[in-house]
Image: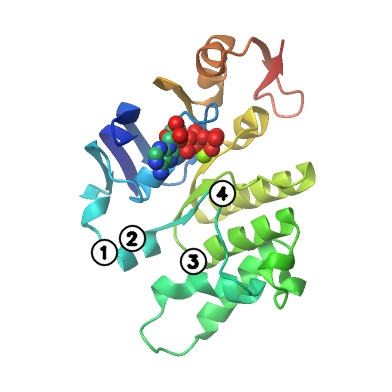
Amino acid sequence: MTLRAENLSLGYHEHTVIKDLAIELKRGDMTTILGPNGCGKSTLLKALARLVKPSNGRVTLDGRDVHALNSRALAREMAILPQSPLAPEGITVGDLVKRGRTPWRGFLSPWSEEDSQACSDALDAVGLADMTDRPVQELSGGQRQRAWIALVLAQSAPLLLLDEPTTYLDLVHQIDVLSLLHRRNVDDGLTVISVLHDLNLAARFSDTLILLGHHGLVAIGTPEQVITPENLEKSFSLKSKVVPDPVTGRPMVVPL
Ligand SMILES: Nc1ncnc2c1ncn2[C@@H]1O[C@H](COP(=O)(O)OP(=O)(O)OP(=O)(O)O)[C@@H](O)[C@H]1O
Ligand SMILES: [Mg+2]
């Protein structure tokens, strides 16, 4: 699996958000998109999942333009969790997660053992197995976020695109979710592309970082290549020191 953006320009009406971006993401990578509010992280993620049409250039999955694939085929290849998903009124956690199975089910085909297994595995993975009958609206922000992550896991796609999957989660649950994705990445070769705001967690859990600024791409590469005081100044106008994380040795940002 190779997901590639070629000469990609994105924007809304006359407003250009990203210009001439070229990136290539390979199967088995954990990639994180970083950058300040409003710089275009969600727009880029949506374009990779063809939810935004490029003003120029294209996105290809294994050489095929994503806009040329049918929705069902694409949904079996990639699952996307948008930044602020809205659950249908009154839906329970269990029913929300079941929606992840849609791309695998035929019209009127019965619910299969495989569908049930995928849903219960996903609910177990996020620790919501005992909340399947609860209405999503009645969950706490962090529980709701985990229900959405379970939906995406239940979709059983080899590529996940996650927009701020750790929003609303306390630190322990943030680490739980990132560790879970990392484990799936190592054990099953799951490819994960996410948007995060926590630079240190991103550096800890990612193979590749994509750092955007208000004028497009600032840096792409390993955490060591990307998380430098120069790049952080360019992207966030942040003055910082970067030191090795005492636990992992990965770069750790100390704002000045
Ligand atoms: N549907 C839209 N129509 C018009 N402009 C939009 C639309 N969505 C986003 N924008 C604009 O495009 C720019 C990039 O937005 P985007 O949501 O990609 O930023 P982001 O990096 O994800 O920010 P955040 O960290 O706040 O989530 C912003 O200036 C935003 O106002
Ligand atoms: Mg966003």
Residue 19 pos. (x, y %):
30, 26
- Numbered disc 1: secondary structure: loop
Helix or strand or loop: what does disc 2 sit on? helix
Answer with left or right where residue 70 lies relative to residue 185.
Answer: left
Question: How far apart are labels 2 and 4 at the CA level?
Answer: 23 Å
| Residue at 57% over, 65% down | 87
User: Residue 186 — which label?
Assistant: 4
Look at the image and tell me whether residue 51 can be seen: yes
Q: Is residue 152 left or right of residue 13?
A: right
Marks 1, 4: nearer the viewer: 1
Residue at image mark 1 = 70
Location of the C terminus by quadrant is top right
Say what amino acid the circle numbered 4 marks: Val
**Counting other residues with Cα less than 10 Å from the Cα at mark 4, is it few (<14), some (14-19), or many (20 or more)?**
some
The Cα–Cα distance between marks 3 and 1, rounded to whole angstroms, is 16 Å
Q: Name the secondary structure under disc 3.
A: loop
Q: Quadrant of residue 125?
A: bottom right
Q: Earlier in the sequence, mark 3 or mark 2?
A: 2
Callout 4: helix, strand or loop? Answer: helix
Q: Amino acid at mark 2?
A: Leu
- Label 1 neighbourhood size at 10 Å, few (<14), some (14-19), many (20+)? few
First in sequence, mark 3 or 1: give its number: 1
Where residue 120 appears, as percent x and y from the top left, is 64, 74
Question: How many numbered discs?
Answer: 4
Q: Mark 2 touching mark 1, by CB under 8 A? A: yes
In the rendered image, which residue does mark 3 sit on?
A: 155
Type of amino acid at the residue the image marks with label 3:
Gln
Identity of the amino acid at label 1? Asn
Task: Tell which of 144 and 210 is nearer to you.
Answer: 144
The residue closer to the viewer here, 137 or 198, is 137
In the drawing, what numbered circle is on residue 74? 2
